[in-house]
Structures are given as C-alpha cells and as structure tokens.
Amino acid sequence: MNRVSRVVPEQDATMSALFADAPLTQPGEAYEITLETVGGHCYPMFKRRHKNLTQLLYAGRQFAGREALVVGDLRLTYEELIARVETGAQWLRNKCGVRQGDRVAIYAENSAEWVIAFWSITSLGGVAVAMNGWWTEAEFADAWALTSPRLLLVDDKRLARLSDASRPAAMHSIREIMHADEAPVELATGLIAEDDPALILFTSGTTGRAKAVQISHLGELGFVQTNQYAAACGLATMGLTLKDKPPSTVLGIAPFFHMSGVGGLILFTYAMGDKLVLQPRRFNPEAALKLIESERVTTWTLLGGMGPMVIETASRVEYDLSSVNVITFGGSRVSPKTVSALRQIFPNAACNTSIGYGATETVSVPVGFGGAEFEENPAATGSVNILHSLQIRNAAGECCGDGEEGEIWVRSAFTMQKYVNDEDATNAVFDDDRWYKTGDIGRIEDGLLYVNARARDLIIRSAENIYPAEIENMLDSYVGVIESAVVGLPHAIHGQVPAGVIVVDSPSDFALDAMREWLAQRLAPFKIPECWRVVSRPLSRNHAGKIIKESVLQLFSDEQGECGHQLK
C-alpha cells in the first residue's frame, strides 16, 4: 500500500500528501481530490464530502439496527441516538432559546448526555464549547469570560465547584437533555455552511492562560474523512471497501474536551458505523480491561500513561483480551518498551498498532503511521497524511534539509480558524499562506517525522498539556515568592510530572504546605507540581534575562533530597 506520495524537493524538507496517483483518489472514485478555496486560500480537498455535521448525523441511518453507544446499562442504536439528538435540538431551541451560531458550553464528564448534547448543539447550528472537566472554578471563569456562551450544560460534580458568583444565569443540568419531552423533529441539513464554527476546544499557550481554539464543520469533518481514507486504503490491500468492514467496538476513555475524544470517539466511530463503549470518570486500568472482556472491545486508543498502567494491571489480573485487534497511541511519545509489552498483552493487535501526531490547532492528524512501518521505526511519529503538508523550518523561516532539526509547520484546510478573542495570538501562529507554526521541534528523515521536543517547555502528563508559564504566573503571585520556575520530570506512569522551584528570602520559614493548598484552589490537580525545591539564591538566567531551565532541572538531580524536600 502506498500511503504516502511525497513531493519533496531535494533542497528542503517539505512533505505533501496529495496522493494524486493513488487508486482511490482518481476521478470518479470515492476519494477524488480537487483544489478548492477556503478562507481565501487554496487547498486540496475531497470532492465528495459532507458539508456539515448534521449531514453526517443523518448518514448514520445507513447503520440502522447497529448499536451506536453503550454507557453502563444504557444501550442506544443509531436510530435511537439520532432520535435523542433531534429531541435534544428541539429542547435547546424551544426551551433554551439556542439559535444557529450561539455558543453552548459543556462542563461535564464523559457520558451519554455529553454525546447527545454535542450532536444536538452542532446539528442545530450552534457551537459546542468543550470545557475542560478538570478545571477549577477560576479556570472555568476565565474560559467562560473568554468565549461568552449563551448557555451552560453542567453535571453535578462540576456544578459543585462553582460558587454562586461563577454560575451563569442561563444554566441547565446536562441530564435534562436526555430527559427532554420535546417531539423529535428532523433537522435541516442544508442551512449550515462548512466553514461555520462548530466547536471550541481549549489549549494552554506559552502565555500560560487557556486559549480558545475555534474549529469549523469542515475541520471536524476533515478529521473524520482523512481517517476514513486511511482505513479504506488498508482494506483496499485486501480487496475490500469500507462497506465490507464489520463494525468495531471502540473503548472510549479519552476526554471529550480533547480532539482525540470529540473527533476520534464521538465523530469517527459514528461515521464508521462502530459501537462506542464509554468508561466514564477517571481512568481505571482494571475497569478498562473488564470492559474489554465483557463488551468484546476490538479497538482502543491509549493516551499518555495509560500504557504502563495497563501493563502493570495485566501482570496481576487476568482478563480475556483476545477481542482487541487495533491499538493506537496518542497524547505523548510512547517508548518501544511499552509498545512491546502491550503487543504481548494484546497479541491479536500486534500488527495493528499505530501512532499519530497533531495538536488541538491542527484539528485533523497531519502525521501518522502504523503496522510494520511503526514497528520498524518506533522512534518516528509517522509520514504525512492525505491532504496535509508539513515543513521543518529554521529560525530564519527557511526550510531545513532532510535530517536537519527545526520547527514543525503544517498546513491543511482543516486547521483551526482562530483563537477566540485573541487576534495577536492567531497571527503569531500563522504565516501569510496559512501554514501553522506548531512550536514543536523535529526533523524529517526518509519521509518520516521525528518529534524531538514538544513546544519547548511543554510538559505532557498522561496526555494533558501543562505549560509552565501558567503555573509560574500563579506561583509568582503568592505572598513571599520572589520568583519561580516549573519544569517537567520523567515519570514511569505519566510520562512527565511538573516540578516547581520557588525563591524566597528564608526557605526554612516558608510554609510550603500552605502554598500548595492555595494553589490547589486555583489550578487543576494535574497541573500542581509533585516535586518542590525552596531556595534563597536567584535562579540562573541567560543574557536575555530568561531563566535557564537546565539549571532548574539540576536542582532535582541533586543528591541532597527527594521530591518534596526543601533545599536552601
């Protein structure tokens, strides 16, 4: 199978996947490619495509009789799911006054209600604002002020975090959308343009505050269709098409406020006619393995530290995992040791492991590969995917040569539209041709991307992005703290955990526990440093006045103490 048709000039490292010579992209074929203009820029696009999520919703009727969603004792077929969405959309319109273009925030854990709410909002022409379920009241309030939703749908646990001052006037329990008594009415499929906004996700930026990423219907559908194309290519090697594929049973654990959750689970599994089995609440490896056995799960995406946790659990608890035939990885780099161990635990998925690379802002997955290619190149993150282009650029903005390290830039029609209410930040990550600057450092070798550093100082804890600047800004505001620095330390389970250094006048008199309690009221738990150093000497800085993070890391390799000890 020729997944990658590269256009790579000898003098630089640009990868483009137009697949003009691939059988499935020829004129008249399902994935015929055309050039179209979006937002004033020309991109390769699939000629045959849904133009909005409402059209995708009703395309699910082709899977009549199949189960679409399983959460505990609740089991919904595709017809039942569509009817619930129609009812939910009428409830939003008639009882909540939601109209096309209105933003509706969801602040809740993964649930059937979350799925119904998302489809109901977007199929009505509204914009789903996916609030991070880990957020504290302060973080929620910042995101709410930034995006100004018309309505909040919230579960009980998140509602309890909000004081009266932070609770919006227009607010409903998310449970209401599942119990609405509105009659289901078929939704119009032609009123929403493909470049209308559909979703807002949040990502922390180098400034430390969450940025709101606005994503169009085109972006969401591009995520789905490019992944469908990859699946179709795999089946074509066996003389099959997507219609020949039996439905998969997908274990859904990735949070819906991430692209891997809303795009990979809610949308892609639906478009493929698969069954989505949810494990709500915090990830529990034993509960996940139990679900795999009871529901005969075939497909699972492991994020961040899930792999090592599953390996440890499977070594002491035995479950029948023979149904799993596809394992994918995302969120952070996976060690070859972890991949090898998981292949032993899931032997029927040994040749079907894969990995992808992207960001919230790229929406779709620009790079990825699997199977034998992944096994032969475990340090790489893959080759460029269809309808995407990728470049490695140096500090002068010039394309690097093959094997040369530089900053990763990507381009497609599916990239985010903008950061909401932040024109400067939007302009800072796009050039004039709408190439997106990822901030990650990598290189291209023989058509494969190798990611060397994730957004420089970015810490990735079990697939959750943590930007030190956000924590440092908070620490610096605490009484008695002169300055601070946060770095990532390696961790066997989570990949990385944050570690903090604070400078004070008298370390021996400083109440570290009191500061940690104060911090816990303002930041999500996964952002709070797990290791601390309290010092009196100033932190080392370079000529530009920036803290040298390498010198900060040395404090944690010092033999004077383990995590939590205070160093003077």
Image: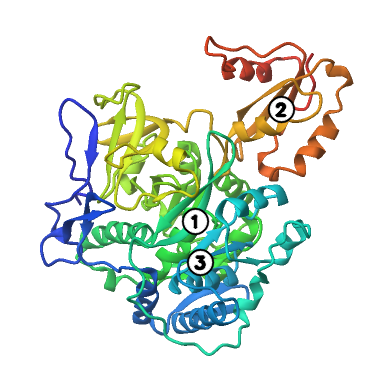
The Cα atoms of the two marked residues, 1 and 3, are separated by 12 Å
Residue 247 lies, in percent from the top left, at 39, 72
Q: Label 2: which residue?
A: 476
* Badge 2 element: helix
Amino acid type assigned to the residue bearing label 1 in the image: Ile
Whether residue 52 is visible: yes
* Residue at disc 1, secondary structure: strand
Q: Earlier in the sequence, mark 1 or mark 3?
A: 3
- Quadrant hosting residue 434: top left
Neighbour tally class for label 2: few under 14, some 14-19, many 20 plus, Cα within 10 Å: some
Residue picked out by circle 3:
102
Q: Upstream in the sequence, badge 2 or badge 3?
A: 3
Q: Name the residue located 18 percent from the left edge and 35 percent from the top edge.
A: 8
For residue 12, which quarter of the picture? top left
Element assignment for label 3: loop
Position above or below: 448 against 234 = above
Residue 408, given in percent of the width and then of the height, sits at 35, 33
Relative to residue 89, is residue 565 drawn left or right?
Answer: right
Task: Please report contact status of discs 2 and 1: CB closer than 8 Å, yes or no.
Answer: no
The amino acid at mark 2 is Asp
Query: Which residue is at the far right?
Result: 509
Q: Mark 1 points at which residue?
A: 200
Report the quarter where the C terminus lies: top right
